[in-house]
Every structure is written in C-alpha cells, then in structure tokens.
Amino acid sequence: MLTADTRVVTRSVSARIIAAGIVIAFCYWASTVLVTLLAAVLMAYFLDPLVTWLERIRIPRAIGSLLIVLLTLSLIAALGWTLIERVEQFGRDWPQYRAPLRSAVEAVDSRLKSLEMHVSEITPPTQHRGRVLTISESTPLRDALLGHLGSLYSFLFAVTFLPFLVFFMLAAKRQVWHATMELFPIDKRTQAKDTLADVTHVLRSYLAGSVLVALLLVLASWGFFRVLGIEFPFLVALVSGLCNMVPYIGAVMSWIPPLLVGLKQFHSPGPFIGIFAMLTFFHIIAANLLVPALVGWRVRLNAVALTVSLLFWGWLWGAMGLILAIPITAVIKVICDHVEGWQPVGRWLSA
C-alpha cells in the first residue's frame, strides 16, 4: 500500500504533468498571439539602445521610438520590395529553370528504372496490374499560396500588430517596468529586478551576437557568389546567410537560394558541388567558432538543451519556433537560476 507521503508526491507529480500539458496546449492554440508578442519583445530589446541614444541627445522617448520603428519598417519594406521583384523575375524565368530540373528528374528516373530491372532479374516474376500515370503541369506559386493560407493569416496578423507592439514597448518602457515590479510582493521585488536585468542582458547580448554572425555569413556568401558569377549575389547571399544561421539544418537550407538561381546559369555539376562545399564550410565555421565565441557564452546553454529546445519549439511553432527557441530557453534558464528550487534545472540547462 502507498503511504501518505507517497500519495502526496504522486499527486504533486500528476498535478505538474497536467499543468505542463495545459501550458503546452495553450502555447499551441495561442501560437499566433504568443509568437507575435515574443517577436515584438525581441525587436524591442534590439531597438532599445537606438531609442536610448536618441533620448540622450534630447529627443523625447516617444518621438525617438516612432522614428526608429518607422526607419525599421522602411528598411524592411525596401528589402521586401526588392525580394518581390526578384521573385517575379524568377517566375518569368521559370521555363528556363524547369528544363534542367526536368532533365535531372528524368536522369534519376532512368537510374531507378535500371535498378528495378536488375532487381526483377533476381526475384521471381509476379503479376502486375497495369498502372496509369498522369502528369499534370504544376503551378508552384499558386500551389504554395493555396497550401499556406493559414500561415498567411498568421503572417498578416503579426505584420499588423507587431509595429504597434514594438512602439508601445519602446515608448512606455519605464511605465511597463514599474508596473511589472508592482506585480510582485515587496520582499520579492529585488529578486524580480535582478532577474529581469539578467534577462535583458542575455537577450540583448544574444541578439547582438546573432546579428554579427549573420552579417559575417552574408558578407562571406556575397563575396563567394560574386566570384562564382551568380545573378543577384547580394540578395542570394542575404537569404542564404540567414538560412545558414539555423542550427543543424541551416547548411542544407542555405543551398536552396543559390541552387535555384544557378539552375539557369550552370549546366555542369562542378559549380553546384562548389556551392554545397563552400556553404557547408561556412556553416561549420559559424556553428563551431563564431556562434560559441559571439553568442554561446552569453546564453550558456549546453548542446542537449539547445537541441531539445529546437526540436520542441520547432515542432510547436514551425519556422518561428526555430528562431525563438534559443532566446526562450535562455530566458527560462535565467529564471530558473533566480528562483529557489529551480536552480537544478538551470544548472542542467548549462551543464
């Protein structure tokens, strides 16, 4: 029979499991709101030093926040417009890209048929029913839009509210800070203040280090693509370099932009092998040298915790989960380090 203490422990564990399930379910169903809010928090942390600098030169914080948000939106809009123009150009040139893709698919298909013939020679004959193969002309842009209508709604929701959230967080920083402190009892406010200060330091350092690593990757990729002669080298390097920042799968993701652009220019495997090798080399250098030196010591997460967080948040929120996984886990570690009884979890995350 179970003792009273055992029953209490069992109930406590069950309650924690149920609470964790409720939190995960809430994160899943409220993903659009939470992702938008967390993205706004990260952007506010990143832009706050600029607003503070404007405040030092006697520009009111509200006006400085508005100027910085408008400048950021202008830069994003200019970059987005340029990318849209390149995507339209890619759509107009699609027949030129489709020919090498079709030839590659036919080559793979012929190899598979040859392998199937060799296998059939060493296996007993079986009765096969006739199959009808229907080939339909695909429209990639339309199929992509129809297949991602839900994601498009989430994106429009975030785009609509994100600038306002960032502006209000920047303009009302002090009021939000004081209001947050008042949520805690008086005897816990010092601890809460230290925790929030450490969260601010970790997030700001992580963002600064990540931006520096991304900039170095973009510049290195840009130089390589210029030497290789790829069209639109800067835009291809920008997308490829940012993809290369994704842990583990970033090397493969970074191949896609130069591969698509190079299909029209290159007709031999040599340039593509060079692209794969060089971008993989960039990813290895970034993952093993740049990220640990510029980012890793700031977030202080071990490889296991980092991998689990990427798997979990990527599964829960998709691509945005991969982007937010590291800062979320770093904040959880800081909170664990400052809350009594949770320190073992914080030590495990950084072990």
Image (cartoon, rainbow, N blue to C red):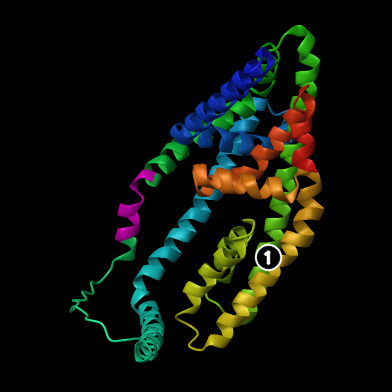
Which residue is pictured at 47% across the width and 73% down the height?
A: 260
Looking at the image, residue 181 sits to the left or right of residue 28; the answer is right
| Front one among 82 and 218 | 218
Which quadrant holds residue 62?
A: top right
Is 133 magenta? The answer is no
Span colored in magenta: 142-150
Chief secondary structure of the magenta portion = helix
Quarter of the image that includes the N terminus: top right
**Residue 345 position within the rendered picture, expressed as x and y whole percent measured from the top left:** 74, 33
**Residue 316 position within the rendered picture, expressed as x and y whole percent measured from the top left:** 51, 42
Which residue is pictured at 57% across the width and 38% down the height?
A: 39
Looking at the image, residue 51 sits to the left or right of residue 156; the answer is right
The kind of secondary structure element at disc 1 is helix
Looking at the image, residue 40 sits to the left or right of residue 215; the answer is left
Number of marks in picture: 1
312 is higher (above) or lower (below) than 2: below
222 is higher (above) or lower (below) than 243: below
Is residue 319 something that shows in the picture? yes
**Residue 225 position within the rendered picture, expressed as x and y whole percent measured from the top left:** 61, 75
**Residue 24 position within the rendered picture, expressed as x and y whole percent measured from the top left:** 52, 32
The residue identified by callout 1 is 283
Quarter of the image that includes the C terminus: top right
Is residue 56 something that shows in the picture? no
Which quadrant holds residue 3?
A: top right
